[in-house]
């Protein structure tokens, strides 16, 4: 009721102001015909004005809604990396056959520029990540993923991620890898074909995980530099991660 009263008051004030200007124009110029013609002309252009204002307002509202959705999605993505993604990235990186090259290509630093992220993303998208079975800790990976099963279920059910196809693909890849590992009571001495199958699942996860991690860090550096500060010091794609500021 109070809101409607407020609108009525504003509408009354605007109508009263319009009437004042009409009277003022009549007193100054004294030509009712010109005033009537001007009012009729304004009414004729009113639909166009409403159309233009409507388009502008709709665009502003759509942009605001999109920004709010992106903010919510980034919060969800941040939760994933805080609880699972960063640890998973580190554990998988330890099993890479070409770990040193990955660290040099994807190891973000505090002075990274947009061009650095673009180059890293391009390289990660084309890279053929290969894993050394002797270095890859499949039992530890299985335990890590099973402890975060509920998180994965909650993230996949989050409606804010419906429009984020890349990140949803990552979640499905991680979830699939978890199910593959959980279905095997023993992960030692696997048949060659089975080991190659799991290696393909791990490779799928790592390719998607590396790309989303780079995009997440780029977002933090731009929007939350204080969070980026500790991420850049502790992320696993460097030789000696440490939270200590030096």
Image (spheres, rainbow, N blue to C red):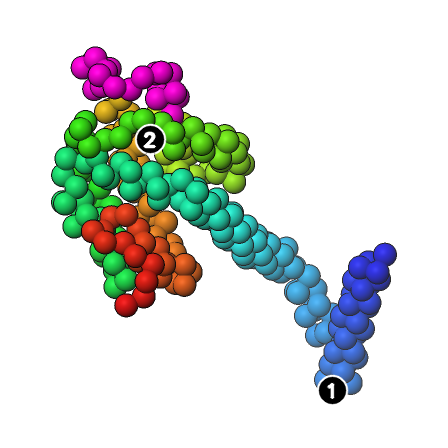
Quadrant into which the C terminus falls? bottom left
Say if 192 sits above or below 222 in the image.
above
* Category of crowding for the residue at label 1, using alpha-carbon neighbours closer than 10 angstroms: few (below 14), some (14–19), many (at least 20): few
Say if 2 sits above or below 78 in the image.
below
Q: CA distance from mark 1 to mark 2?
A: 85 Å
According to the image, label 1 marks what residue?
Answer: 28
Q: Per the image, is 128 magenta?
A: no
Q: Is residue 144 left or right of residue 188?
A: right
Counting every numbered tag in the picture gives: 2
Which residue is depicted at the point 78% across and 85% down?
27
SS under mark 1: helix
Q: Which residues are magenta?
A: 178-197
Quadrant into which the N terminus falls? bottom right
Which residue is depicted at the point 66% across and 65% down?
42
Say if 34 sits above or below 4 in the image.
below
SS under mark 2: helix
């Amino acid at each position: 009721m109070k809101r409607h009263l407020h609108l009525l008051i504003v509408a009354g004030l605007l109508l009263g102001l319009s009437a004042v200007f009409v009277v003022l124009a009549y007193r100054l110029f004294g030509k009712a015909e010109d005033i009537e013609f001007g009012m009729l002309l304004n009414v004729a252009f009113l639909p166009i004005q409403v159309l233009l204002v409507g388009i502008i307002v709709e665009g502003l509202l759509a942009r605001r809604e999109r920004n709010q959705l992106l903010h919510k999605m980034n919060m969800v993505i941040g939760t994933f990396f805080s609880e699972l993604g960063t640890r998973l990235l580190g554990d998988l990186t330890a099993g890479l056959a070409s770990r040193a090259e990955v660290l040099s290509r994807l190891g973000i630093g505090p002075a990274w520029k947009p061009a650095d992220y673009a180059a890293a993303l391009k390289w990660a998208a084309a890279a053929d990540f290969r894993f050394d079975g002797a270095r890859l800790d499949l039992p530890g990976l299985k335990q890590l993923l099973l402890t975060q099963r509920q998180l994965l279920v909650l993230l996949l059910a989050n409606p804010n991620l419906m429009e984020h196809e890349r990140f949803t693909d990552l979640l499905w890849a991680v979830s699939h890898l978890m199910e593959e590992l959980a279905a095997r009571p023993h992960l030692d001495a696997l048949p060659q074909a089975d080991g190659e199958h799991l290696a393909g699942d791990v490779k799928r996860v790592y390719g998607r995980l590396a790309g989303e991690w780079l995009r997440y860090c780029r977002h933090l550096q731009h929007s939350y530099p204080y969070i980026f500060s500790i991420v850049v010091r502790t992320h696993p794609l460097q030789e000696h991660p440490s939270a200590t500021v030096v």
